[in-house]
Amino acid sequence: MPRASIYISDTPQPHQIDERYLSFAIDISVLAGGFWWEGSSIIRKGLGGLRVQPLSLNSKKLDRLVQALGPAYVRVGGSEADKIHYFEDPTNDKDSLVLTKAMWDSLHAFIQRNNLAFSFTVKYGLFKRQLHGDWQGSEAEKLLRYSLERGYRIDVCELGNELNAYWAFHGINAQPGAKKLAQDYSTFRQVLHSFYPNARVLGPGSAFWPKLGETIKPFSNITKGFLANLTEDIDIVDWHYYPFQSARSPVRTRSAKPENFIDYKNLDDFKRYSLQLKKWRDELQPNAQLWTGESGSAQCGGEARCSDRWASCFWWADQLACGALMSQAVMIRQSLIGGEYGLVDRLTLKPRPDYWLSWIWARLMGKQVFNVTSSDPNLRVYCHSLAEGGQLDGSRCLLLINLNKHSVTLDPSIAEKVKAQYELRAKKLTSKRIKINGKKPKLKKGKLKLQDFPLLPSTNVVRPLTINFWIMEN
């Protein structure tokens, strides 16, 4: 049996992840009933081809699923965030998307009862900037004023969605340059803080493509220039990243296929781009946090029979752990619900494999992060302090992601320190259901505990195509 050696540092990294590190998004298209991906094989200006019904958030089952992942941020943004109208439609266009007061009220009731923090993408607008000049905050002021009057929570705001890709969604003439965007952000900060002085400002949320990064130089490589031209410090520097692309995507540099999800080389781009972003942050905005502001398995809604299956857990486990290692304070998953990449099926409210991976991560992986090395590139290994409230407080949790199709044996000295093991596995990569320690996870009246799963015999063998959490004594 192949062997692998790992080394775990005794000293944690100086940074810690946020208590809401593992967070999630609800796309504004799903919330307000816009053009979405499910059931559609076409794409139009970055949107799906079918209109969906507005999402009902008044669901006790959804509440229970959300509370089991908390604490978390919920981000409301997405491609239609920049064309949506707040409360009423001045154009009377049949294709217009309107965020009604009832929708906004329902969203904030959902946020309040589930103890979520809120991140919102404010509309940048579709006007041609060369003709109309600066960003205007009148629409945003209407929304913010109403929210303040109702006592609604707004913790984080950004201006526009994936502004380096604006040309693809909204036309060449709508694309802002880095310097212009920085100027608009100054106005945006003033408008936001006139209503919510403690809300943090996040940006620029640039989209990075697998293999390509920010794509077209110098037209859409705006992140560094944006950070360099800011006249005031920004609170959070963030980016968006999808490691794969669905069949709907008009540009596919790396297709979403089950086998691609377990190729370690395909997972390494995230680290490379994270280091690049961290370098820019350190040079230009050293006081800002780093966030992955949006990430899912595959662009354009995810890939059926892949993003919603066991295969997707491998990239998600690796990216969660790698993001923490790379100083990302928060990781926002696209999406909580909606699309094949949703943690929860939109129509049935059934949790998918990625949900259960997220559930166990939230219970075991704490704020402190330790460096780990592995001699086998297909055995991805990470280490955190054990989450507060977990068994054996003060210990560590070792995450082992075996991408190999064979078992790997570790040094017995590692196994001697292990006090409990949780193994996630499935029959095949395209399985809809997974097991934790041989038992299917299921919430019963919203409750499920680690103690509900049978203990495994202590072992130093990591089985093929499994994701493992090992609790180790300090």
Image (cartoon, helix red, strand yellow):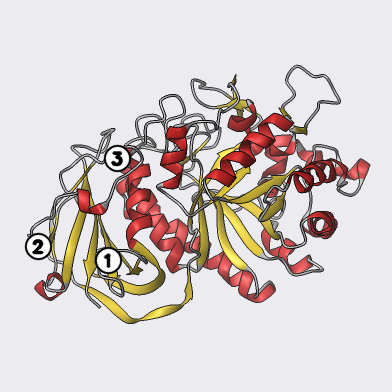
Real-space Cα separation, disc 2 to disc 3, in angstroms: 23 Å
* Sequence-first disc among 1 and 3: 3
Amino acid on which the number 2 mark rests in the picture: Thr
Q: Which residue does the numbered mark 2 point to in the structure image?
A: 459
Residue at figure coordinates x 54%, y 31% from the top left: 58
Q: Quadrant of the N terminus?
A: bottom left
Quarter location, residue 165: top right
Above-or-below relation of 339 to 116: above
Do labels 2 and 3 touch, CB within 8 Å? no
Name the residue located 58 percent from the left edge and 44 percent from the top edge. Answer: 111
Q: Which residue in the protein does label 1 denote?
A: 398
Q: Element type at marker 3?
A: loop
Q: Residues within 10 Å of mark 2 (few under 14, many from 20)?
A: some
Q: Is residue 48 left or right of residue 308?
A: right
Residue located 52% across and 21% down the image:
40
Quarter the C terminus occupies: bottom left
Residue furthest out toward the bottom: 11
Question: On screen, 56 above or below 194?
Answer: above
Q: Amino acid at mark 3?
A: Trp
Q: Which mark is residue 107?
A: none
Q: Position of residue 369 (x, y in %)?
A: 39, 72
Q: Nearer the viewer, residue 266 or 54?
A: 54
